[in-house]
Image (spheres, grey):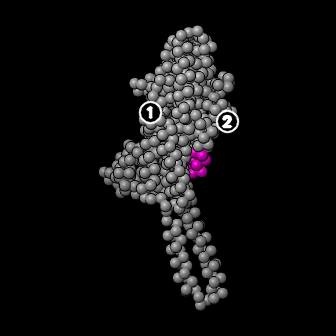
């Protein structure tokens, strides 16, 4: 009901707001609830009463510590908020009228089928009808019990969601070696595969597929760091297939990014471009990953020497980047506006390096690095950006600074195969332009030692 905790009903104009319409295709329920409170005065208790979700879970959804992925929960939210059909469609749900008609038609079809079967039975042996009705009732109960039986415990999906969110927040930090991270994530992935192969409800199955997709995406990135591109490609494809199976466009786009980056580092440039295109097509409207994927596609065309296509994609990426919001649809829900822009900007940096424009590459590299927290180099992406800055310095005629930036990247706490690969480009550039410079020789020795050490760890 209406009152101090919320409106009598959600105003029709609420569903036409641009920020609401942008949140729905992403199934960003946290933002939807936040906007409800902002524009209608709805409290979390009011939202919980209308949707059947406990207030503490509503709070978690708004804070980004909980995700809403199950279709039945999305249906309950849409029904409880009396969401109009246009909004339901943007959320990926059927219209209310069609849903009711479909339910009625299914029920009517079932009744007619049962009546025909019962009619045939009556004509064959009228005296057995009452006994058969009792048997049918028992059989129906057995079907119900079987359909509701599940090997997925009540807390399993919540545990998986929490674990995946933690992995999403921590995967790029130097807290654990990539090999250990891979082992942990693989164990989770195997367990999810067991749940998928076992008995579960339809709603649970969808959530399990989404969890499997996210875990495979992490395995793809980690395998790439360990220098296993074939495994990385296989996991990225697995993530994409799970995402498309359950209609999760954001996950599909992230999987395409992982696949395309893997193919880039293994020299499959045509395949990498095609994967990037699929990712751009899959990314929901307004999603930050669209800007990142356009920037990534720009560097793919740059490495092939297609300057016009690269510059066109860079322009698209930068236009899309101007509208980046704080939402990324990743499990952790912690990626903010600066991080979204950073991910795009580092691809732009590499594109300008490969386009042979060291001044623009330097500007973007320095801007990107400024977004990182001060302190030692920690993430793989930061290491690669620092090497890109070093490559720009080679182009600007500053070998000392180039070697210094490259050294900072390679002496970071976490060196991975993509970092070593980019450092190889820097070593070649220094050797080509300044073969006798003492800093070139020093960096070459460090590069050789790092490459050996990383290969031994993998």
Q: Position of residue 300 (x, y in %)?
A: 63, 29
Residue 288 can be seen, yes or no: yes
> Of residues 4 and 402, which is closer to you in this image?
402
Comes first in the chain, label 1 or label 2 = 1
- Residue at left 35%, top 51%? 56
Residue numbers of the magenta segment: 238-248
Q: Residue 343, percent across and down? A: 51, 31
Asked if the stretch drawn in magenta spans residue 382, the answer is: no
Could you tell me which residue is drawn at 44 percent across and 55 percent down?
Answer: 156
Query: In the picture provided, is 65 more to the left or to the right than 313?
Result: left
Name the residue carrying label 1. 174
Foreground disc of the pair 1, 2: 1
Q: Quadrant of residue 430?
A: top right
Q: Are marks 1 and 2 in contact (CB under 8 Å)?
A: no
Residue 129 - label: none
Q: Is residue 396 left or right of residue 50?
A: right
Residue at image position (60%, 11%) is 435
Question: How many other residues sit within 10 Å of disc 1, few (<14), some (14-19) or many (≥20)?
Answer: some
Mark 1–mark 2 Cα distance, whole angstroms, equals 31 Å
Residue 337, compared with residue 191, is above or below; it is above
SS at mark 1? Answer: loop
Residue nearest the observer in this picture, 43 or 413: 413
């Amino acid at each position: 009901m209406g009152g101090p905790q919320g409106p009598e009903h959600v105003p029709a104009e609420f569903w036409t707001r641009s920020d609401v319409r942008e949140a729905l295709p992403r199934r960003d329920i946290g933002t939807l609830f936040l906007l409800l409170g902002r524009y209608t005065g709805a409290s979390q208790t009011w939202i919980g009463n209308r949707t059947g979700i406990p207030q503490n879970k509503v709070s978690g959804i708004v804070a980004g510590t909980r995700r809403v992925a199950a279709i039945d929960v999305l249906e309950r939210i849409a029904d409880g908020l009396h969401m109009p059909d246009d909004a339901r469609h943007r959320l990926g749900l059927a219209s209310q009228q069609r849903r009711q008609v479909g339910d009625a038609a299914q029920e009517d079809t079932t009744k007619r089928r049962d009546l025909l079967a019962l009619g045939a039975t009556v004509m064959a042996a009228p005296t057995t009808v009452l006994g058969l009705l009792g048997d049918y009732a028992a059989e129906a109960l057995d079907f119900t019990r079987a359909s509701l039986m599940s090997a997925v415990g009540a807390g399993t999906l919540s545990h998986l969601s929490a674990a995946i969110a933690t992995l999403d927040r921590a995967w790029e930090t130097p807290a654990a070696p990539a090999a250990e991270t891979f082992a942990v994530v693989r164990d989770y992935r195997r367990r999810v595969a067991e749940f998928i192969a076992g008995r579960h409800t339809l709603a649970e199955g969808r959530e399990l597929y989404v969890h499997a997709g996210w875990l495979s995406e992490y395995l793809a990135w980690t395998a790439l760091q360990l220098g296993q591109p074939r495994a990385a490609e296989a996991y990225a494809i697995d993530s994409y297939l799970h995402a498309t199976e359950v209609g999760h466009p954001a996950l599909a786009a992230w999987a395409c990014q992982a696949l395309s980056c893997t193919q880039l580092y293994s020299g499959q440039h045509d395949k990498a471009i095609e994967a990037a295109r699929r990712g751009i097509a899959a990314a929901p409207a307004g999603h930050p990953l669209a800007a990142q994927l356009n920037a990534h596609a720009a560097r793919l065309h740059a490495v092939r020497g297609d300057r016009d296509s690269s510059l066109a994609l860079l322009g698209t990426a930068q236009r899309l980047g101007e509208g980046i919001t704080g939402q990324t649809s990743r499990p952790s829900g912690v990626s903010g506006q600066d991080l979204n822009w950073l991910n795009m900007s580092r691809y732009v940096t590499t594109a300008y390096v490969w386009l042979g424009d060291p001044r623009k590459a330097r500007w973007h590299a320095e801007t990107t690095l400024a977004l990182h927290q001060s302190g030692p180099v920690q993430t793989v992406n930061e290491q690669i950006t620092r090497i890109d800055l070093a490559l720009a310095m080679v182009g600007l005629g500053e070998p000392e600074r180039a070697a210094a930036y490259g050294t900072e990247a390679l002496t970071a706490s976490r060196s991975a195969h993509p970092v070593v690969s980019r450092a190889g480009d820097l070593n070649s550039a220094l050797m080509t332009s300044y073969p006798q410079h003492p800093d070139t020789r020093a960096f070459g020795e460090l590069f050789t030692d790092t490459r050996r050490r990383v290969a031994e760890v993998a």
